[in-house]
């Protein structure tokens, strides 16, 4: 090999190595139990009445954690729901949950 061939050869070798490593990582990646069903999370619907917790202020939209996943949510009646408030799912509109605050002292969900 001449010195004019070493640099292009090294560049090609690096590119081939990167491609092989990328393909190997994609092929051996661990997949979640429900990942084939719906994106990376698992569930695509949430039953009305399911409880969760607001992880941001809903004014009137924000984020809630329901069934161990974070969901975009909207307050059912447009009121602001504070971060940390226990909420109940009223209905689902696509991938957005419509929620209302659970009154303090309500019995635990069973």
Image: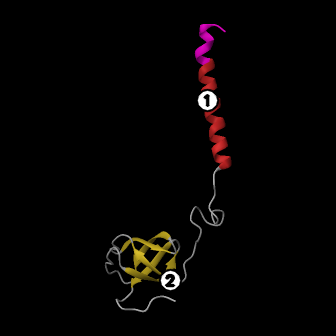
Disc 1 packing (10 Å; few <14; some 14–19; many ≥20):
few
Q: Secondary structure at mark 1?
A: helix
Residue 52 vertical placement versus 110 (above, below): above
Could you tell me which residue is drawn at 63 percent across and 25 percent down?
13
Left or right, 88 with respect to 105, comes to right
| Residue corresponding to mark 1 | 15
Residue nearest the observer in this picture, 33 or 63: 33
**Sequence-wise first label, 2 or 1:** 1
Above or below — where is 11 with respect to 36?
above
The residue under the point 43% across, 92% down is 107
Residue 96 in percent (x, y) is at 48, 73
Toward the top, the furthest residue is 2
Residue 84 image-quadrant placement:
bottom left
Queried whether the magenta region covers residue 67, the answer comes back as: no
Q: CA distance from mark 2 to mark 1?
A: 50 Å
Magenta part, dominant SS? helix
Residue 2 is a magenta residue: yes
Front in this rendered view, residue 55 or 73: 55
Q: Which residues are magenta?
A: 1-8
The residue wearing badge 2 is: 50
């Amino acid at each position: 090999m001449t010195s004019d061939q070493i640099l292009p050869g090294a560049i090609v070798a690096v590119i081939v190595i990167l491609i092989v490593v990328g393909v190997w990582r994609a092929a051996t990646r661990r997949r979640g139990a429900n990942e084939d069903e719906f994106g990376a999370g698992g569930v695509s619907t949430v039953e009305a009445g399911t409880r969760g917790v607001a992880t941001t202020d809903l004014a009137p939209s924000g984020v809630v954690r329901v069934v161990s996943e974070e969901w975009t949510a909207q307050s059912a009646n447009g009121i602001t729901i504070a971060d940390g408030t226990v909420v109940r799912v009223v209905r689902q509109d696509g991938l957005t949950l419509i929620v209302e605050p659970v009154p303090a002292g309500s019995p635990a969900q069973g």
